[in-house]
Amino acid sequence: MTGSLARRVAAEAVGTGLLVVVAVGSGIQATQLSQDSGVRLLACSLAAVFGLGVLITLLGPVSGGHLNPAVTLSAWYADRRRSTGPTLREVAAYIPAQVAGAIGGAVLADAMFARPLVKLSTHERSAGHLWLGEVVATAGLILLVLGLQRTGRARLVPAAVAAYIGSAYWFTSSTSFANPALTIGRVVTDTAAGIAPPPSSRSSRPNCSGPGSDWAPRRCCSGAPRTRETTTTPQPHGQSPPRSDRPPDRPESQQTTPADLLTNPCSVPPYWRPNRCGQIDLAAVHGRIVEA
């Protein structure tokens, strides 16, 4: 590696950004040109092989051609005692540059294809088997890079890494991202190569169970919730007042008909409406049936 730290950091940022351009741009182009998923995967894997090989060959003499936070961290950890790998200061500078370059590369790829520049992806790629595929792909990549360096064959890294990633596109369930910076960059592009961010909002939804829990919580009327107006009338001595939770009787002319339910969902009696958790008050319904 040659040049100042600023030059090496710039090389990592530019290289990682161009790598994301290759991944996202080839995904968009393949989707536009073919409807066959196999053809699209073949096109993306070929673009990754050639693009990654060229970038590592070009930037390797400048910054090492890591283009990947996992490779940077593994190189630092493996050589931390021999002082032949990147220092901790270089690691602290490389990783933010790689992440920033990845985000910039995604924006550039979207701009080239007239897509929204920054839009969170909606492609869900979160499952146990996909995580396992990423572990296998990343572990294989790190072992390959460190193994070639330890045996004095570092000159083979560009071709070997490109060939490995191209094959991992096919033998892993996740199509072998094997790059945390690349993953972050693909979050901000809603294209075929995008990755949806973790659905953290789902954890804030109420956890409801029991009868009627499969109803979608929704309000059919806008505005504030309705409140039942009750009046208290004097009762003769010895008689208890009527139950306050009893649904009031409706005149026969105002009884709900099937046509009313179709034209105005708000005409459903209150005791038949689900609450915010999608549940129906079965006790109120049973009492109404008994009274009828």
Image (spheres, grey):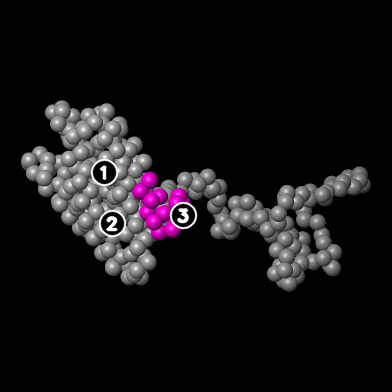
Query: Residue 84 lies in what quarter of the image?
Result: top left
Whether residues under marks 2 and 3 lie with C-beta atoms below 8 angstroms apart, the answer is no
Element marked by disc 2: loop
Q: Nearer the viewer, residue 198 or 30?
A: 30
Element marked by disc 3: loop
Give the spatial CA distance, label 2 vs label 3. 24 Å
In the image, residue 99 sits, relative to residue 286, either above or below, namely above
In the image, residue 89 sits, relative to residue 167, either above or below, namely above
Q: Earlier in the sequence, mark 3 or mark 1?
A: 1
Quarter of the figure with the N terminus: top left
Residue 126 coordinates in the image, percent (x, y): 37, 52
For badge 2, the amino acid type reads Thr
For badge 3, the amino acid type reads Pro
Element marked by disc 1: loop
What's drawn in magenta, residue-wise? 103-120
Which label number is shown at residue 116?
A: 3
